Amino acid sequence: MEKALTLSHPSKEKGNRLERLVVKMSKEAGLSAKRAYASDGRSLGEAEDVDVLIDNKWKVQCKARKKIASYIPPPKSCNFTVVKEDRGEVLAVLPLKDLLNNLWYE
């Protein structure tokens, strides 16, 4: 009897690719990085929503979207963008390569 071939949902596959890219970029920057098995941080001893662990201390959740709002990526003339929702926390958005290069200084 043949086993049925099961395919992941395309959005799950896209998320997995992003997680693998984050690990690859982290390692290229000289940092250790691990991807959580099945995108479940509990496999790394962390909270369920942790997708990647960098240098055993930086917990990352990866979100891949077809399109993000045009005002979120920093313009070429800026290093990062700061965003905040009403009564929410202030967040910084910057290129991952820049963040990874600066983790050495922490």
Image (cartoon, rainbow, N blue to C red):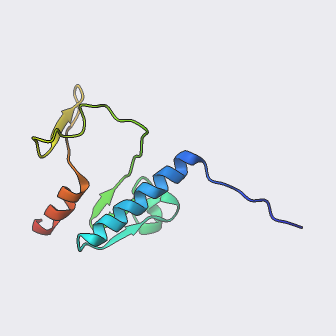
The number of callouts visible is 0
> Which quadrant of the figure contains the N terminus?
bottom right
Q: Position of residue 33 (x, y in %)?
A: 33, 70
Residue 6 in view? yes
**Residue reaching furthest front?**
76
**Residue reaching furthest top?**
86
32 and 43: which one is in front?
32
Q: Which residue is at a point 31% across and 31% down the rendered structure image?
A: 69
Q: Which residue is at a point 23% across and 74% down the rendered structure image?
A: 30
Residue 55 in view? no
105 and 2: which one is in front?
2
Q: Position of residue 104 (x, y in %)?
A: 14, 69
The answer to whether residue 80 is left or right of residue 37 is: left
63 and 71: which one is in front?
71
Where residue 48 sits, quadrant-wise, is bottom left
Would you place residue 51 above or below residue 28 in this image? above
Q: Position of residue 58 (x, y in %)?
A: 27, 62
The answer to whether residue 1 is left or right of residue 11 is: right
Would you place residue 82 above or below residue 105 in this image? above
